[in-house]
Image (cartoon, helix red, strand yellow):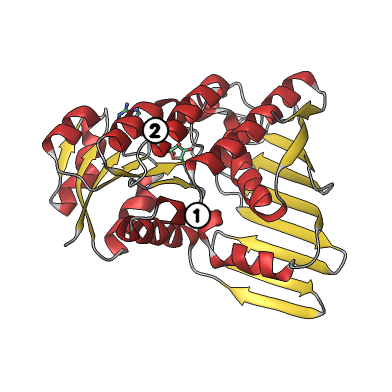
């Protein structure tokens, strides 16, 4: 029998999720909730589903097996906790939350619902590319990781307000923090700096976030990582990449928008492989975990994502203070 899926939040990211759910086997999107009814209707209507403006009402009226929580980060906690308490499996968009308090509550709720799956949507974490990087690095330690993430992005109001969304640091930077942690382990301390030149915000609406940021990670292993993110104007090309260096490895990851591939050389072997689109893989692995009744089988658990949030928030403090900040 098909799983009955609901979705909360009908904004930018659900234009990626809804078609990916349509393409997945054995799951039907039967209900969508957004505080703006037309957004919920636009997603639910064509699929023969019902539209809601209250997720509480949606939970009450629908018998959902799974739910996608795709609201802005400040609004992740309540619908996620209620779903987990009600035995509904959750695909929670990243970052896990805006605050450590909310994230800890989600981790605790997931722990208190041992049969209920909760995946956090860092989709790069879900691809076979990560497994191949780990294999390529077997027997050696990464020494340096360099992430680059440039391009236009939709200027949603919550994203442009640091207090609500954390700007590029939580939105784009946290994808790289998550991936670099998955490759090189815990991050002990961070530094962060930003340009005063505006790129996307040179003209048009301005928020209180930076357009160009560099984060530096000091890994517990002794490795050094960094990520450069830049929010550029509409029409500029997108670039998502990570380079990884070890004593016997020089690895380049291309992470979209069109191609997902690994190239380079490690352990005397040339690397060259291409991978499928990560969001589809992330959703497929979430559904596999649901069907297998195994919350530990998701690529990124709430506890993993809490670790990533702690690093991102340390970067935020480093950006404000200009100092090296330890990760708690
Ligand atoms: N995985 C990725 O690569 C990726 C990319 C973009 C965004 N995201 C994440 O997805 C989430 C949503 O981002 P977005 O870009 O779609 O934002 P968005 O602003 O485009 O959409 C959010 C939607 O949620 C609705 N909403 C807000 N509060 C609500 C509530 N209490 N109940 C129901 N609906 C509510 C808003 O009306 C809006 O339509 C964020 O956590 C963001 O970080 C992930």
Picture coordinates of residue 91, whole percent (x, y): 38, 46
Give the residue drawn at x 21%, y 32%: 37
Is residue 202 at least partly visible in the picture?
no
Q: Quadrant of residue 132?
A: bottom right
Q: Quadrant of residue 218?
A: top right
Q: Quadrant of the C terminus?
A: top right
Picture coordinates of residue 73, whole percent (x, y): 46, 30
User: In the image, is residue 276 above or below residue 197?
Assistant: below
Give the residue drawn at x 63%, y 32%: 310
Q: Secondary structure at mark 2?
A: helix
Where does label 2 land, which residue? 109
Side (left or right) of 328 relative to 269 = left
Picture coordinates of residue 105, whole percent (x, y): 44, 27
Where does label 1 land, which residue? 299
Q: How many marks?
A: 2
N-term mark: 1 or 2 = 2
Give the residue drawn at x 67%, y 56%: 241
Which residue sits furthest bottom?
A: 269
Side (left or right) of 284 relative to 210 = left
Disc number placed over residue 75 in the picture, else none = none
Q: Nearer the viewer, residue 48 or 311?
A: 311
The answer for how far apart the CA atoms under marks 1 and 2 are is 18 Å
Picture coordinates of residue 236, whole percent (x, y): 61, 49
User: In the image, is residue 195 above or below residue 13?
Assistant: above
Question: Which of labels 1 and 2 is toward the front?
Answer: 2
Assess mark 1: CB under 8 A from ligand 1? no
Give the residue drawn at x 17%, y 52%: 46
Q: Residues within 10 Å of mark 2 (few under 14, many from 20)?
A: many
């Amino acid at each position: 029998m098909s799983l009955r899926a609901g979705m909360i939040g009908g904004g930018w990211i659900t234009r990626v999720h809804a078609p990916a759910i349509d393409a997945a086997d054995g799951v039907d999107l039967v209900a969508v909730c957004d505080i703006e009814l037309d957004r919920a209707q636009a997603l639910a209507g064509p699929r023969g589903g019902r539209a809601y403006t209250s997720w509480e009402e949606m939970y009450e009226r629908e018998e959902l097996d799974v739910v996608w929580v795709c609201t802005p980060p400040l609004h992740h906690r309540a619908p996620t906790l209620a779903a987990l308490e009600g035995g509904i499996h959750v695909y929670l968009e990243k970052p896990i939350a805006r605050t450590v308090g909310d994230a800890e509550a989600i981790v605790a709720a997931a722990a208190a619902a041992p049969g209920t799956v909760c995946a956090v949507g860092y989709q790069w974490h879900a691809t076979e590319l990560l497994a191949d990087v780990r294999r390529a690095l077997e027997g050696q330690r990464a020494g340096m990781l360099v992430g680059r993430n440039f391009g236009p992005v939709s200027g949603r109001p919550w994203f442009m307000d640091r207090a609500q969304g954390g700007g590029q640091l939580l939105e784009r930077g946290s994808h790289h923090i998550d991936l670099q942690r998955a490759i090189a382990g815990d991050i002990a301390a961070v530094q962060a700096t930003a340009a005063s030149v505006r790129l996307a915000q040179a003209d048009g609406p301005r928020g209180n976030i930076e357009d160009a940021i560099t984060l530096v990670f000091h890994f517990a292993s002794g490795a050094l990582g960094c990520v450069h993110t830049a929010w550029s104007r509409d029409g500029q090309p997108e670039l998502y990449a990570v380079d990884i260096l070890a004593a016997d490895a020089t690895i380049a990851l291309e992470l979209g928008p069109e191609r997902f591939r690994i190239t380079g050389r490690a352990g005397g072997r040339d690397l060259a492989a291409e991978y499928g689109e990560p969001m589809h893989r992330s959703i497929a692995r979430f559904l596999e975990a649901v069907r297998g009744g195994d919350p530990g089988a998701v690529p990124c658990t709430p506890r993993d994502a809490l670790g990533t949030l702690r690093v991102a928030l340390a970067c935020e403090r480093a950006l404000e203070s200009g100092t090296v900040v330890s990760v708690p």
